[in-house]
Image: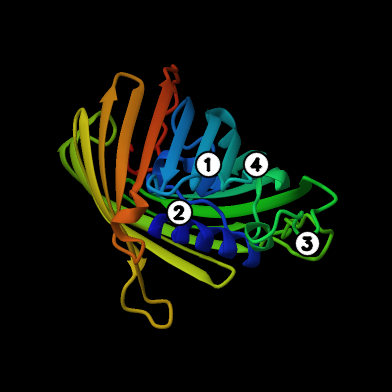
Amino acid sequence: MKRILIFFILIFFGLSSKAQDPNFTQFYSSPLFLGPSFAGGIAGHRAVGNYRNQWLGIKDAYQTISLSYDHNFINFHSGLGFSIIRDQAGTGKLGNTRAGILYSYDFTPVSDWHIRPGLGFYVLQTSIDFSKLTFGDQLTSESPSSVVPPGNRSTNDIDVASSILAYSDNIWIGFSWDHMLQPTTSFYNDQSRLPYKFSVYGGIRKVIRGFIVSKIEESITGAFYYRSQGGYQQVDVGVYWFRFPISFGVWYRGIPLVKPYQKYDALAFMVGYKYQQYSIAYSYDFTISRLGFNSGGSHEISLIYEFKVKTRKRYKPIPCPTF
């Protein structure tokens, strides 16, 4: 019974509040979702796949899948990427699909520091199967619901995102501005639009064994990720420990000290493995909010493949965690 109540609460807030973007616990394993500046952020090119099943204990909760590919054009100091992400929730299959092309440019204003602005152009689609939904007046009567279904089962719009990233050998800091055009998400042709999303992220890495210019065998990295969208704020703070070929991470998600945004969301644990050009990672979010154990937590899997390339130019990759 408690799970049913939680599900109806989720549906109510999903239909009555402004839409928000999905989140990944392994956000550095979905770099193009984090910001266009990460397009071409490696020496060659890579393919990335991410899958997230949020609140497994609640039927038809949130599922997110993301695919991306990007390439670094070293001779032109540029990166180009393509990405698509699909988020779906609820019995009515309320879904959001975002596909786009991203570009970044890398320049060095001072020695050992890189600045990388980026820009992304997207097509968005929001869809729903209204026939699968059951409303309150249908629970007490066999008559059709008094809720008028929308004329369209899907809506389409375009969007733009921008970002800027600064990094050296072991430090990075970045900023992203998503939904610059505030695309529409309404099925009823009203002025319901996706609010701006602002993100700030960064971190510092300590190399324990190995060399940055060749192969890092062991390192520890501290990082953070803050985002704000439509009155909603969230912070992820965590630590990664990497010792080739295994990586471990622990994260806290929430805003515990700042009122009125004070909240406790989840503790996340991650383990990853790197084999040749492959990197795979699994993480579990242990819910510490009021949803508690009934949510079932959240599971996430990431897979990255980096293609081998030969280049005569030396390239400094972005020092974000491998996973």
Q: Residues within 10 Å of mark 1 (few under 14, many from 20)?
A: many
Residue 239 percent coordinates (x, y): 24, 52
- Disc 3 to disc 2: CB gap under 8 Å: no
For the residues labelled 1 and 2, the Cα–Cα distance comes to 16 Å
Q: Which mark is residue 32?
A: 1
The residue labelled by disc 3 is 146
Q: Secondary structure at mark 4?
A: strand
Q: Residues within 10 Å of mark 2 (few under 14, many from 20)?
A: many
**Residue name at image x 39 percent, y 83 percent:** 259
The residue labelled by disc 2 is 166
Amino acid on which the number 3 mark rests in the picture: Ser
Foreground label between 2 and 4: 4
Q: Secondary structure at mark 1?
A: helix
Disc with the residue nearer the chain's start (3 vs 2): 3
Q: Quadrant of residue 276?
A: top left
Disc with the residue nearer the chain's start (1 vs 3): 1
Q: Quadrant of residue 236?
A: bottom left
Disc with the residue nearer the chain's start (4 vs 1): 1
For the residues labelled 3 and 4, the Cα–Cα distance comes to 29 Å
Q: Which mark is residue 97?
A: 4
Amino acid on which the number 2 mark rests in the picture: Ala
The way the protein has been coloured in the rendering is rainbow
Residue 303 percent coordinates (x, y): 40, 29
Q: Residues within 10 Å of mark 4 (few under 14, many from 20)?
A: some
Q: Secondary structure at mark 3?
A: loop
